[in-house]
Image: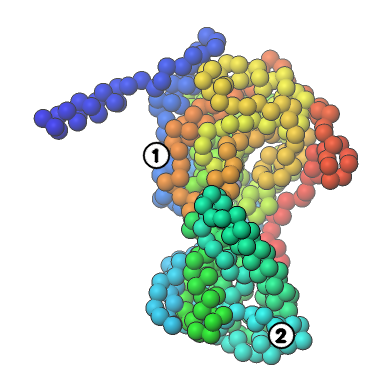
Amino acid sequence: MLRSLTLLALALLAALPVRAQHFPTDDPVIRQIWAEGMENSQTELLAHHLIDVIGPRLAGSPGLEQAQEWLLETYADWGIPARKEQYGTWTGWEAGALHAEMTAPRVAPLTVELMAYSPGTDGPVEGPVVMPPANLTEANAADWLATLEGAFVLLDAPEPMCRAEQELVANARPETVARLDSLRAAARGEWRQRLRAIGSLEALEAAGIAGTLNSRWSGGWGANKVFSTNNERAVALDVSCEDYGLLARLAASGNAPRIRVDAEAEMRGTVPQFNVIAEMRGTELPDEYVLLSAHLDSWHAATGATDNGTGTLVMLEAMRILKETYPNPRRTILVGHWGAEEMGLIGSGSFREDHPEVVEGLQVGFNQDNGTWRFERIEGQGFLGTAEHLPKWMAAVPTDIQAQVTIEVPGEQNNRGSDHTSFTCAEAPVLRLQSPYDEYRQYTWHTNLDTYDKIVFDDLKQNATLAAMLVYGASEDPERMSREPANLPINPRTGEPRAFGPCRAPQREPRD
Ligand SMILES: [Zn+2]
């Protein structure tokens, strides 16, 4: 009985229609886009493969190469022409297993991540954990360096507390918050002085250290941001806020902590780097383009679920929806799955240089690069024409979605942060689809916690559906959008009117 009731309940649930929508126009394509995007969404399947099966997609790693091949296969299955375009090369690197534990004064596992492009250890390595002494100066640094053979060196000031900042503010006395803030500021200042005395990573490596230990806490429970290292021989680890504090306190109190590290990592020489471009050719205006834009690469400490798996999935799913509902677009629809955004907007910048015809013929582009949650804002980036065209494209979208999205037109340019700037610098309008930022910045952006479980699929579905509707509106628009910049507000730093940032040549090869 229970079982059949449950089955009945499930059947009813499955039969429930997606919440009824009010469509402001009779446009049948908009209704089909809604049905395809909301009732036949492929986002969960696609996300599982990209984020769980393939995983992290660091520039130069096999994960990024696999993700690119998977995109090509996926587009081929859908009948959408897609290609890889090589734009340069990067440092090849592949990480394997990683184990780290404290061995003295007691045994305890450690939560660590390998910093990107770090050397491995070639088997387990055990050694003391040391911190640069407080009295270290350029004059006595050589004596200290001479004691470091086989040691792991702490390179960041430890955090006085690893609780999420907002909870501290909510629960602690104001004087406690102030005291921790000043402790943190003082410790950072003092450590900067110690690092200046050491001089360089090369000096540490020349002293024969076993490894470097950093901890770049992200301000929330269990979250660290993990970037790359320039170490050439010694393993470079990022240690959790908690474990780093433990090691630092033991070292400071003379309790002689030791750790053992076994890190597999392989340098792969220099490897070719690609963008993946998919295209639905325009039937009337093939030389005018509507661009979907999101970087495919990620940092490596987690699986790049929200930076930028979700942006990638929005654009990928939008292309699938468009192929099903609008297969013969008026203008050419392009999607750019960029390489090496995290290394400095390299894939998108190279595409701008390599495709002047797209920059020239661009009607508009839409870039996403800030995680999950539904789009709350579309930024016109200071293009006057967005004030006329964006509201027009949005006017066909179900009213429920319109009510959730603020259109900032013409808006300010945001000359930083993601691939849109590779185009706005050339005055080609690529706009940002923005989700809420604060939690993203604190917990998943470039952290060890950027994993599949953080994705909000209801929002991802709706975002892909909205992106498809915007592309449809921009493609069908009878008019080409102007690129004239708005009268932009004064930049308070310079006293000059704000301007589109200059285009910078992309770094197409690894730095030295
Ligand atoms: Zn990103």
**Residue 489 quadrant:** top right
Residue at the limit of the structure toward the right, as seen here: 495
Q: Secondary structure at mark 2?
A: helix
Kindly tell me whether residue 68 is visible in this rendering. Answer: no
Q: Secondary structure at mark 1?
A: helix
**Residue 253 place in picture, x, y as percent:** 54, 82
Look at the numbered discs 2 and 1 and tell me whether their residues touch, using CB distance below 8 Å: no
- Three-letter amino acid code of the residue under disc 1: Leu
For label 1, the residue is: 45
Quarter holding the C terminus is bottom right
The residue that appears at 52% across and 70% down in the rendered structure is 244
**Residue 222 place in picture, x, y as percent:** 48, 58
Q: Distance between the Cα atoms at labels 2 and 1?
A: 55 Å
**Residue 217 quadrant:** bottom right
In the picture, measured across the screen, residue 256 lies left or right of residue 411, that is left
Q: Is residue 103 above or below residue 167?
A: below
- Three-letter amino acid code of the residue under disc 2: Ala
Total number of numbered discs in the rendering: 2
The residue that appears at 84% across and 46% down in the rendered structure is 493
The residue that appears at 53% across and 23% down in the rendered structure is 401
Counting other residues with Cα less than 10 Å from the Cα at mark 2, is it few (<14), some (14-19), or many (20 or more)?
A: many
Numbered badge on residue 141: 2
Of labels 2 and 1, the one closer to you: 2
Quarter holding the N terminus is top left
**Residue 272 place in picture, x, y as percent:** 61, 56
Counting other residues with Cα less than 10 Å from the Cα at mark 1, is it few (<14), some (14-19), or many (20 or more)?
A: few
In the picture, measured across the screen, residue 503 lies left or right of residue 289, that is right
Q: Is residue 442 above or below residue 224?
A: above
The residue that appears at 78% across and 49% down in the rendered structure is 504
